[in-house]
Image: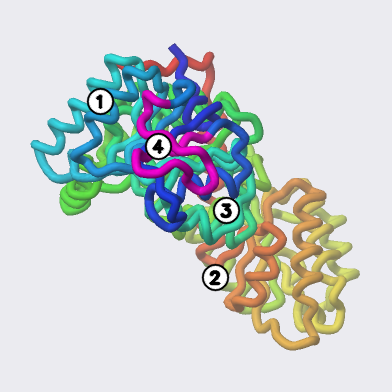
Amino acid sequence: MIDPLQALLAPASIAVVGASDNPHKVGGRPLQYLAAHGYTGQVYPVNPRASTIQGLPAYPSLDALPQAPEAVILCVGAEAVEQQIALCARCGVRVVVLFASGYAEVGEAGAAEQRRLAALCRAAGMRLLGPNSIGVASFDSGAVLSFASIYADCQAQDGAVAIVSQSGAFGVSVYALLREAGVGVRCVAATGNEADLDTADFVYALAQRPGLRLILLYLERVGDPDRMRKALQAAARHGVQIVAVRAGQSAEGRRTAGLHTGSDGAGGPALDALFADEGCRTVADMAEMLACVPGYLRWRIGAAPGGQPRLAIVSNSGASCVIAADAAARAGLPLAELSTASRARLGELLPDFSLNRNPIDLTAMLMGTPALLGDVLRCVSADAAVDAIVLSLVAIGGPSYDVVRFAQDCSAASEGSGKPIWFYSPHLHVRNAFMANAMPVFCSEAEALCEAQAHARHLQLANTGNGPIEELVHA
């Protein structure tokens, strides 16, 4: 049957076993987060040594609660886990979040214990997140079932991006960096050792939540490729793009993944083909993943019918125009042949010595004419021959350049035309201004061009799927 994981993403009631009055302890942070993020369901702290915890009535055990909670967070040591899971099963709990480590990642004895826990949950029809997980945080429901300290440091904002990661540190790092960039995040799920719930479950469930556009994955294993394929297909049918870091592709990487989460890596030709066939983009690392996010949130268009997007290159530096033209040629990206009307308009805007045929050199004229950038971008983006624009601003400093206006005009031109503008600058203050307007920013011509190519190729692949959504089931 379909498992939407509602009891984990938006539970009606939550119990915290091992709850603490100290909000800085593992057993105290979930209670603090639930209150801080506006969770409106029932919350039950469980601790036999307290009558109240963080202002809430406390209970000595799960079977003393006035009702069976939908979700239980186990903030207990490994020695107490099996007993508490058995009690959860008897009480009718729907899903358990297990923080404890020391299972499959430490060897066969730990793996055997992990299998016993999974079997207990399966026999009771109960789902298990973990072990070795820092939990899940759903910011649309306020259900932050996690002890990660990052949620105390970053102001939450619901958004169109979700993060599903086997590694807790990777997931919350991506979350923090996206929030620093002003990007809202719907959910961060850390799947840990994946004794039961895995990345496929979360992809399938999250893709069906309204308003989501992008899921970012960190994988160290794909336990059931067929289920992952169905999850990716479900995401595609709902218009949700998937970008993944698939770790453990080398022998040393696989060995390290085994020590980290008890996994055997997420590489190999079969998985390469699976993810490519289902329109999932694989990136090398966190930096590449973060750099691509603004483009997916702004634009859904892919490449031109001929295959590659036709580019217009715009810069205030003739040298940057030349370097970008070389980089485009190396990447196999064609430069757009501008229309007669566009060339005439650029001739009116720019001096005779400008490279106004594509690449387009704004020259030093930009310094004294702040409206020039917006005028040129509107002209170029309106040209039917142009699929995307690569813009560079260099040697920008001092009061002569209105960087804030440049960023606003660039964003408006892209918004008005619906065409991507990939921006690069060597100057941090310039990149920050464009980032504040939700533009994708890069440090070099080559980085911007590579992302333009990868983005278009991914959306072409993602738009090729057909057929109904298949149900995701566990064997």
Residue 118, labelled with which disc?
1
Q: Quadrant of the N terminus?
A: top left
Which residue appears at 60% of the width and 76% of the height? Answer: 428
The secondary structure type at the circle numbered 2 is loop
Q: Residues within 10 Å of mark 1 (few under 14, many from 20)?
A: many
* Residue nearer the viewer, 11 or 467: 11
Nearer-N-terminus badge (3/1): 1
Q: Residues within 10 Å of mark 2 (few under 14, many from 20)?
A: some
Q: Magenta residues?
A: 43-64
Where does label 2 land, which residue?
A: 443
Residue 374, labelled with which disc?
none
Rendering quarter of residue 17? top left
Where does label 4 land, which residue?
A: 46
Count every numbered label the image shows and give the total. Answer: 4
Which residue appears at 53% of the width and 61% of the height? Answer: 153
Which residue appears at 77% of the width and 83% of the height? Answer: 364
Residue 179 at x, y = what percent? Answer: 58, 57
Residue type (three-letter) at the residue carrying disc 3: Ala
The secondary structure type at the circle numbered 4 is strand
Residue type (three-letter) at the residue carrying disc 2: Cys
Q: CA distance from mark 3 to mark 1?
A: 44 Å
Residue type (three-letter) at the residue carrying disc 1: Ala
Nearer-N-terminus badge (3/2): 2
Residue 286 on the magenta segment: no
Nearer-N-terminus badge (2/4): 4
Where does label 3 land, which residue?
A: 452
* Residue nearer the viewer, 172 or 114: 114
Rendering quarter of residue 91? top left
For discs 3 and 2, the disc positioned in front in the rendered view: 2
Q: Residues within 10 Å of mark 4 (few under 14, many from 20)?
A: many
Q: CA distance from mark 4 to mark 1?
A: 23 Å
Nearer-N-terminus badge (4/3): 4
